Image (tube, helix red, strand yellow):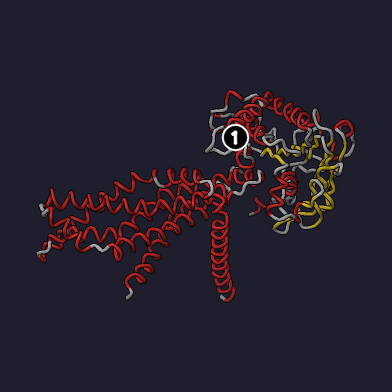
Amino acid sequence: MTDNIVEIDNLSFGYKGRLLHKGINMSFPRGKVIAIMGGSGSGKTTLLRLIGGQLKPNHGQVRVDGEVVHNLDRSGLYRMRRKMGMLFQFGALFTDLSVFDNVAFPMREHTDLPESMIRDLVMMKLNAVGLRGAHSLMPTELSGGMSRRVALARAVALDPALIMYDEPFGGLDPISMGVIVNLIRSLNDALGATSIVVTHDVHETFSFVDYVYFVSEGVVVAEGTPEQLSKSDMPFVHQFVHGEADGPVPFHYPAPDYKREMLRGHDA
Amino acid sequence: MLKRLTKLLQGIGSRMLERIWRLGAAARFFFYTMVYSGESLRRPQLVVREVYFTGVMSLIIILVSAFFVGMVLALQGYNTLQKYGSSDAIGVLVALSLVRELGPVVTALLFAGRAGTAITAEIGLMKATEQLSAMEMMAVSPIARVVAPRFWAGVISMPILATLFSMTGILGGYMVAVPLIGVDDGAFWSQMQANVDFKEDIVNGFIKSCVFGVACTLIALFEGYDAPPTAEGVSRATTRTVVISSLAVLGLDFVLTSFMLSP
């Protein structure tokens, strides 16, 4: 068993003629919480899909638990995914199932456990995220933060070795955000799992992760512990961490000269 | 001029290629649905649940429509038959029209509008809200868990709905022909009994409704599964479901009728 549960080697991926990742190298040690950060459209979510085997890289490799993901056949891929849990950006709860049935879904699909045991397990998972009392509600009756917590309970239903979080803080109020931060850390430590958090919320992320990768324009531009990155004087990291509007990531989308464009309008 | 012509031909060519590509994708989708059907049929409760949503929930519109169709058939039929002094044959006319043609065809058209659009919208929205991706990531095949049960539910529901349509239509025809117009009660039923053949009429109608069930459900499922994951994409897919299903039903009806009537 390797020390890293996920290893990404020289990964390149693109579609429709646009290269999203250009030779990315990353490793994710077991038991750690690692963040992948970067601006919108930098391919962070795509990285999660490549790790989960939903996309195939153009070049390079993604290895999960020592196995090259894109070389696996369907049954191999499904066997590997049973070791994974994923929290989608907006929860992706099944809208035709109650909170209880959503959390029970992976258990019913992959185990032969009796219904009484499934009930106990679901209640334990829901209790861990503080929503045991909401087990009979439908997803449409939940707030954004509650949906995310139910989705989290569902993601850890089968005690996965790897948990992936896609923008877990997007659109949450500060209280819900704090709750999710604590849950990610405590569930990871309690399960002895590894967590990969894709996000662009700097301050929340730096408060609880062990390691951070910064991705921009298809490459890893910086990496390190939150302490190291907070002190970094790299222009990109500085702009990102301090939320500056302009810098290596330009404020303006590429455009012709402003003055010339405005004057052309008058000439016409 | 040449440039415009080239552009026109390019446009036609790319549309044709897109149509062929979609046809191929639909065939592959059908193949996978068949492959994964065993998995979902081993859990019949999934199919039963979908039979409720596609079949039982369509019952009201099917029965009400059937009643009116039967009544109109009786009125129109009587109007023509009385000119030839054969108004007693009204029962046969209503029954044959319903069992052979209107039952399967109108049921399929209504099914496409009611259940087909619901299936497309549901699956399209499941895709747009990443529910299908979530299922994939949980090592559960959406084809086995979502598509196949709905497919078999549609295939099972359609013949049952068509049968109920024909029965209700005949009842509607009876209500107009006998109590309202005054056609003889005995003549209405006995002529029907004597002239409606089980194999030629009822079984052929049943076969049609099974074929329409496969076509309508498959089109609805494919359109939902293939829909771009946006509000506009889902709405376009829903419209396409109704248009393509309706044309497919009418086209298939002609083909099936030709085979059934050939000696």
Coordinates of residue A206 in the picture (x, y in percent):
81, 30
Give the residue at x 89% y 33%.
A228
Asked where in the image residue B24 lies, by quadrant, the reply is: bottom right
Q: Is residue A14 above or below residue B10?
A: above
The residue nearer to you, when weighing B223 against B34, is: B34
Coordinates of residue A265 in the picture (x, y in percent):
65, 51
Asked where in the image residue A59 lies, by quadrant, the reply is: bottom right
The residue nearer to you, when weighing B12 against B105, is: B105
Determine the secondary structure under disc 1. Answer: loop
The residue nearer to you, when weighing A208 against B6, is: A208
Asked where in the image residue B210 lies, by quadrant, the reply is: bottom left
**Chain bearing mark 1:** A
- On the image, numbered disc 1 is attached to which residue? A114
Quadrant where the C terminus of chain A is found in the figure: bottom right
Coordinates of residue B159 in the picture (x, y in percent):
37, 54
The residue nearer to you, when weighing B68 against A215, is: B68
Q: What amino acid type is highlighted by mark number 1?
A: Pro
Q: Residues within 10 Å of mark 1 (few under 14, many from 20)?
A: few
